[in-house]
Image: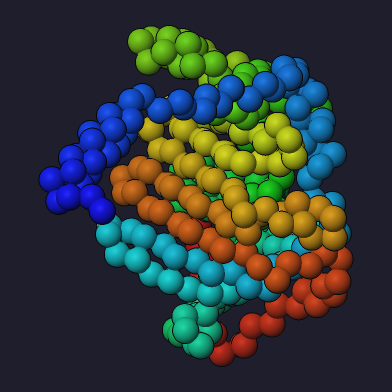
Amino acid sequence: MCSGKRFTSIFYWIFILTFFFAGCKQTQKITAPKKIKRYSVSKVIKITNENSLKFETLSVKKVAIALTNDGRTTSVRGSYKIKRDSIIQLYAQKLAIPVGKLEVNTDSFRMVYFLDQELFVGKNNYLSKLLGMDIDFGVLQALLSNKIFSFRQDPKDKDFKEFYCDIEDEMYKISSIRDRKIRKFSKNEDKLERYRNRMDEAHVIKQDIYIDPDSFVVRRMVFKDLDNNNSAKLEFSNYEKVTNQWFPGLIKMQLTGEKRIELSIELSKISLNDEKNFGFSVSPKYKRKLIE
């Protein structure tokens, strides 16, 4: 049997050895940077378009939105459906109370506010004025169906002609304007004006699109209006397969301008090509208001 003095001595040396080895530098696992094959802009866009959602109708039956504005968060639930290149319809409710619905077609919109029994109608360019960016039907449809798009929307199908491709954050980054060109714009307003005239654009928007190098889906979109510094950032995640096609389950959005607005949008119960009802009835009792 060990004496108390010997036991204390053994315990002491165990403590010293433990402290010594604990203080030794541990072997660290070094993760090598992911190797991503470099592609041209056209190649990345081609593969991304091939992997994008194919549909005639898209229905998202469950949408949960949390909006944060000036530190206050509001939550609503709803749904939306799209008839490709034709109609977008959205429905919203607060708790179990219907709040409103919106229909957007290729050139105009109708919005019903149930609580005050009002119907608002207007042209889609009103949405652009409201958001400070050129938002038309094609852009809205692309955002709601997770498709790659360019604000230019060149009728000759050369939307991405001026874009270039880089690798950033282990993703392909498709950008409309190089950062060094923006630095030149910031130092010389005449160069920005000449660029605007050459591109025939009312607003010069820098558009960055981040593409997953494995699945070739859109992971992030960043837009910055160089005229007024308004910006929008969208993050797409929680991808799941819908009839063997990838679609995000979560979209996080940040809008920065005079105010900072944050949106978290959860999407579920998604189906393709099974929606047949795109009726949009409005009670004749509702007050009609024209928005310009």
Residue 141 seen: no
Residue at the spot x=80%, y=77% of the render?
277
Residue at the spot x=41%, y=54% of the render?
262
Residue 142 left/right relative to 25: right
What colour scheme was applied to this rendering of the protein?
Answer: rainbow
Residue 71 left/right relative to 32: left
- Classify residue 187 by image quadrant: top left
> Residue 42 appears at what percent x and percent y?
78, 23
Residue 63 left/right relative to 183: right
Query: What is the number of callouts on the image?
Result: 0
> Residue 161 appears at what percent x and percent y?
72, 20
Question: Residue most toward the left?
Answer: 5
Q: Is residue 127 above or below residue 12?
A: below
Residue at the spot x=52%, y=24% of the render?
30
> Residue 122 appears at what percent x and percent y?
57, 61
Residue 19 left/right relative to 166: left
> Residue 203 appears at what percent x and percent y?
50, 31
Residue 245 seen: yes
Q: Please state which of residues 243 and 82 is positioned toward the viewer in this rendering.
A: 243
Q: Please state which of residues 255 and 18 is positioned toward the viewer in this rendering.
A: 18
Residue at the spot x=71%, y=45% of the render?
147
- Classify residue 41 by image quadrant: top right
- Classify residue 56 by image quadrant: bottom right
Q: Please state which of residues 65 and 29 is positioned toward the viewer in this rendering.
A: 29
Q: Is residue 52 above or below residue 225?
A: below
Q: Please state which of residues 178 and 18 is positioned toward the viewer in this rendering.
A: 18
